[in-house]
Every structure is written in C-alpha cells, then in structure tokens.
Image (cartoon, grey):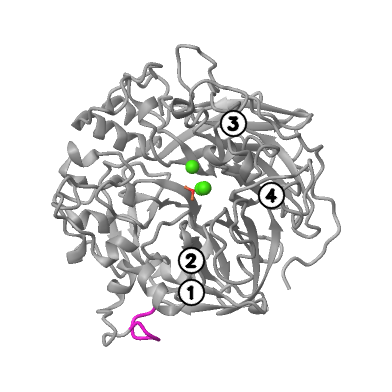
Amino acid sequence: KPGRPGRKELLGFAPVPPSSADTFTVPEGYETQVLIPWGTPIRPGGPAWRKDGSNTAEEQAEQIGMNHDGMHFFPLGRGSEGNRRGMLVLNHEYIDAQLLYPDGDEEMTAEKVRKALEAHGVSAVEIESVDGRWRVVDSPRARRVTGNTPVTFSGPVRADHPALRASGPARGTLNNCAHGFTPWGTYLTCEENWNGYFGTEDTSWRPTAEQARYGVSARGFGYRWHLADPRFDVAVNANELNRFGWVVEIDPMDPRSVPVKRTALGRIKHEGITLTESRGRIVGYTGDDQDGDYIYKFVGEGTWRSQRARGRSPLDHGRLYVARFDDDGTGTWLPLVHGEGPLTKKNGWADQTDVLLRTRQAADALGATKMDRPEWIAVNPRNKDVYCALTNGSGWEGEANPRTPNPYGHIIRWAEAKGDNTATTFRWDIFVLAGDPAYDDRVKLDDSNIFGSPDGLWFDDDGRLWIQTDISNSAQNLVARGYDRIANNMMLAADPRTGEIRRFLTGPRGCEITGVVTTPDRRTMFVNVQHPGEASAAWGRPTPENPRAVSNWPDFDPAGRPRSATVVIRRTDGGVIGG
Ligand code: FEO
Ligand code: CA
Ligand code: CA
Ligand code: CA
C-alpha cells in the first residue's frame, strides 16, 4: 500500500492564507530575494535588459529566457561549498509576444521569430551566495540552449533516421516545461506543447493521422512563425515536427557539449521526466500533458553504471511502458515494444522507431488509461512511492480520474510491486482531491490548504512533498469554476505519511508557480514565478469582477513589464526550508 506511516514532524511552518495581492508571500520567519528575471545577462557585463522589449535576438541569446519553469541546482566545489555555489539550470517554456517585443506580433518578421527562439530553451548560470545574498557570477560554464542551438539525436531513432531529415540541420528545443536530472550529473529538458509553433497558409494542407494525434494544425497556437520562417511551415517542412516531442539531455558543466534528444524515452508532449534507481537500473517517469493522455515509464537495460562503463547512455537502451489503472486499485505497465502485443508489422508498425515516433498512437493501441492531464511526477525518497499531478481535465477513465468533469485536479500515487520501480504492476490510490469544499464536499481541505490545478511536484530529501499550482487565468477569474477563494497560484508542502498539507507561499497576480529545488543542505530554496500578469492585455484593467488581471511583479516599474523570475527563499534563522 502506498504511504506507510512514520513519526518525525515534517512541516514546521505556519501556513500562509490565500492571496489575490500582487506580491510573493512566504511564512513568518522566511525571507525572499528575486534572482535572474527574464532578460538578465547570463554573465555580468552581458547585454542589459531593456524594459521596453527592444533587446535584439542576439542580445536575448545572452540573457535569461522567458517564462521560467523546471529547474535543478548542480552544486560546485567541495562538501559544504556546494551549498553556496553551483550551476542553476532552468527551462524557459514559451513566450508572450506582448511582452517580448516593443510592438507585439501583429506583424511577424524573421527577427521576431529569431528572438522568440532565443527566449525559449534552457539557461545555465553559475550562482554563489555571499552573506546570504545570491548573485550570478562570471562563469565559463554559463550558457543558453535555445530554439536555435544545434542538437543531435540518440537511441533507436538515430540522427540519420529518414523521419528526421528536414530542411537544414537539426536545431533547437522548444516549450521546455518541466525537467529531470540524472545520477551522472546531467540535466534533462522536456518538450511539451511543441505542436503549437507550427502552421501553414496552404489551404490544401491536411494533417496526417499521426500529426492530428499530436494536435498539429494549420493555425497552431497562433504564433504565425511560419509566415517569416519556412522552418515552421508544416506544408513545406513536415519532418521538422519529428524533431520535437523528446527529452533532451544537456551537460551543465560543458557549454560546448551538444544537447542530445534521447529517443528511447518516447515522443509525446513530455511534461517532465523524473528518474529514480532500482537495483542499479534507471527508471524514468514521464507524463504526457494533454486532457485524456497517458503516464509513461522507461526502465533502463542493465545497470546505469554498466551502460556507462560500456560507453553507452543509460537512456538509449531500455523498455518504455504506458500505464493502465484498473478500478480495483491495481495497475499494469504495458510495454511499448515492437513485436509485442498489438505493435506488430501486421498491424502497421514498421519497427521500434515507428513505435517511438508515434508513441501516442502506440499507447492508444495498448489500451492505456486516459488521464486528466498528467503533469509532474515525483518519487518519495523514503519508500519509492510515485506521485503524479493530474492538473485538471474532463474526468477521464475509471476511478483513477474520479471527478467528472475535473476542474481542480488531483494527485494520484502508486507503489510498485515489491517496492521495485522496474516492476510491471503496482497498487495505486488518490493522495488528494484538490479544490474548495465550498464547491465540492468531497474535498477534504480548508482555508490553510485549499488549492487547485496541481502541476509541479517535488520531494526534498527529508520526504516533504512540494506541490505547485497552475490555475489558468481564465479559470481563476471564473467564480463559476470555484476558484475565487483559492485565488493566486501557490506552493504547498505535504507530509505524505499523514496526508497533512499546508500552504507555503503564494505568488503575484496572474503567475503560475513552477520549478523548485534546494541546495543540498535544504537551507536555500529556489522557486520559479512564471508569467506574472498573464492575460493582462486580454483582461485589461482590474475591476471588481476581474481583480487579479494586472501584475507588474517584480520590478513594479510603471514603464516596465512583468517578468518571470526565480525567487530565493531562506529562513531568517538559517534552518531547513519547510521544517
Ligand atoms: Fe507546461 Fe503541463 O505544464
Ligand atoms: Ca507544468
Ligand atoms: Ca500546467
Ligand atoms: Ca505554464
């Protein structure tokens, strides 16, 4: 059974109330510092941020990207030095054209596409703490990986696979949502809503079944990059699509290393990837964030150390599975392996590369369980239970998605058979049903912890589960959906043994809270604020019905613009965060 009881108190702070203020609020006894907002040069002395959006694409390539998301801290130096110095590596998910350019994007130009590409991807900056204040230092390791960076492919779908042949060499990573990291010291960035960047004006173009399954359309998400850059025109450069939807490995210590797309992990809209080890083998969990899509697991072949000793990546060889949750509380991992089950030549599956390029359709064929938008996945370091945030959705199949529709989301968890994360069966339960009991009496939460739309999940080494929320601003502004008392997005901490949950922080208006990590001593925490002021342009000035639309965080400069940023959190007494 998941969630065995324990003794020591994990949560030692007083919960903060819900907030609709344009501030970042932490519990009493904690202090904060804003670090690396969008546009900060990745090396001191680099191009300065211009608050009117007039930085060029070349300048953006040397600055922190937009819309901070998943993040990891790689300590540098010996022993305790790693609590004061390290590489902070973080994702930049997407762009807001109203903020990125001085004049919006009504007119699309090649320079605007270039700047948008440079604002995506990953930032790696070296940071250090001096007297409790953190700052970016001039570092030879600092780098940006963007939508323009040369990349390569490894695993079953190799770089020379015909499906990856498109106009120009393979470049870039896009829609970098959540992340992962490996025991051999690398960073993993995950490509989520990559389909939205592509489009075409060709009225005769129709998506293939595979393209339609990934949501590729002539309009895309309205970015209209294809008007100025044929790379993103699906009618003329369709194989460019196949270069996205992967997990990408980056060495944060070598700025000259080429990012590698690890194709054995499947091609979906990866929210993130969370690695753990079982009997020396790598196990990776990854969610496909779409309403009605699936949860996947990768199990490495052999131990990861033996793979590396042979000069192979532990992420290139292994079995990919997709989850089926049965109503009796058990579950099964179904193998996405060519030649097994329905994935045969006779059924139109050419080989394993075909299975991986069309991962979603292969999972459909296996009868996996459709879920309410699988987001981050976290593994409890104490007992290896696995937790997945199902942010919200239509209320898909079975008891694993128990509310129909499901505007608030829930967190599901499972224990793999015999505590072995490589197992092919598991037992699951619902850890928490999110929402506000004022609107749904099945919700067992109160003012100290009502929340909705869980997204980020992360365990610290003490076993605290950190829960971050992503309530969309349209939902946030609709009393009818029951979000009015929950208000701004937040982060909470949970004790997985007792189920106790407390609200730890609230973000400014219009933001989402996503990305969290601490230094090894757990005395400095880094949290990302994404898209403060989102939808301000659409929602206009605040009104009584729409009180949360406008943010100018963190600069509060009337002539400036809201910026995503990392927030450093410390306890004034220097103690463990959350304890
Ligand atoms: Fe990018 Fe599913 O959040
Ligand atoms: Ca997310
Ligand atoms: Ca989300
Ligand atoms: Ca987001």
Task: Name the element at disc 2.
Answer: loop
Type of the residue with mark 2: Tyr
Type of the residue with mark 1: Ala
Type of the residue with mark 4: Gly
> Label 2 vs label 3: CA separation?
32 Å
Q: Is residue 401 magenta?
A: no
**Quadrant of the rendering where the C terminus is positioned:** top right
Residue at x-position 47% and y-position 31%: 535
Sooner in the amino-acid sequence: mark 2 or mark 3: 2
Please name the predominant secondary structure of the magenta segment in the image: loop
* Residue position marked by numbered label 1 in the rendering: 368
* Residue position marked by numbered label 2 in the rendering: 294
Of residues 270 and 277, which is closer to you in this image? 270
The answer to whether residue 133 shows anywhere in this view is no
Asked if labels 1 and 2 touch by Cβ distance under 8 angstroms, the answer is yes
Left or right, 577 with respect to 340, comes to: right
> Label 4 vs label 2: CA separation?
23 Å
Sooner in the amino-acid sequence: mark 3 or mark 4: 4
Sooner in the amino-acid sequence: mark 4 or mark 2: 2
- Kindly report which numbered mark, 3 or 4, lies closer to the viewer in this rendering: 4
Task: Name the element at disc 3.
Answer: strand
Query: Residue 517 at x, y = what percent?
Result: 60, 44
Sooner in the amino-acid sequence: mark 1 or mark 4: 1
> Looking at this rendering, what residue extends furthest in the right direction?
7
**Quadrant of the rendering where the N terminus is positioned:** bottom right
